[in-house]
Amino acid sequence: AQKITQTQPGMFVQEKEAVTLDCTYDTSDPSYGLFWYKQPSSGEMIFLIYQGSYDQQNATEGRYSLNFQKARKSANLVISASQLGDSAMYFCAMREGMDSSYKLIFGSGTRLLVRP
Amino acid sequence: NAGVMQNPRHLVRRRGQEARLRCSPMKGHSHVYWYRQLPEEGLKFMVYLQKENIIDESGMPKERFSAEFPKEGPSILRIQQVVRGDSAAYFCASSPPNRGDTEAFFGQGTRLTVV
């Protein structure tokens, strides 16, 4: 069963506008972590933001915020004030359990294109 | 503080040859993870290693693939008798021990092309 679902294969956004990338997950473990990574055309995986299942507040990192809705099992990434350099693939990932293992389950990704 | 180093960045092998991919974790990191990314897909977990131990290899194909993380030196992902379907990007990530609340750091990946 697919545990991470990203339903938007591709998205467009106008420069300087905000965009939301969707991510839903499925797990029976009460302890889990959710990650977003950016993969530009150069191929490297860039960590953006992390949300723990017990975190009371939504995570934020600069222009990135995570809209964490636990009851709906969604962890959408919000990018504010989009920049041309934000054009990339974005992956949502989950780690079940809170031990030191980084066995991550990745979604299929969303390709974001920022228009000038 | 150097990041996770993978080499080579690009590797071309003919069908039937062996591919060796290397990963040096960040300083102070003793946990290494290998992932494979097929074209237009997300990363898939392959194996989790600590020094001299394979902790979880549930994502490794049963044949031709092996991984090690010796006491000294980098972690190696070895693919024997490569086939066209092995063409993919292989990523290594590392993490410190006993930290469940932070990210794993990824290397830049090795892009394997089997011709």
Image (tube, rainbow, N blue to C red):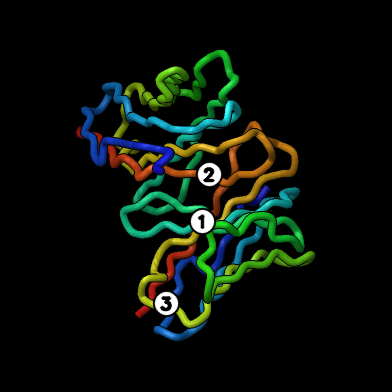
Q: Quadrant of the C terminus of chain B?
A: bottom left
Mark 2 and mark 3 in contact (Cβ < 8 Å)?
no
Q: Is residue B26 left or right of residue B17?
A: right
Residue type at numbered disc 3: Val
The numbered dot on residue B35 is 1
| Count of marks placed on residues | 3
Identify the secondary structure beneath mark 3.
strand
Mark 2 and mark 1 in contact (Cβ < 8 Å)?
yes
Circle 3 chain: B
Q: Is residue B100 left or right of residue A114?
A: right
**Rendering coords of residue A54 (x, y %):** 60, 20
**Whether residue A63 can be seen here:** no
Q: Identify the residue at the far top of this view.
A: A56
* Camera-side mark, 3 or 2: 2
**Rendering coords of residue A103 (x, y %):** 57, 46
Q: Which residue is mark 2?
A: A104
Q: Which residue is mark 3?
A: B12
The answer to whether marks 3 and 2 sit on the same chain is: no
Q: Is residue B77 left or right of residue B31?
A: left
* Mark 1 burial class by Cα count in 10 Å: few <14, some 14-19, many 20+: many
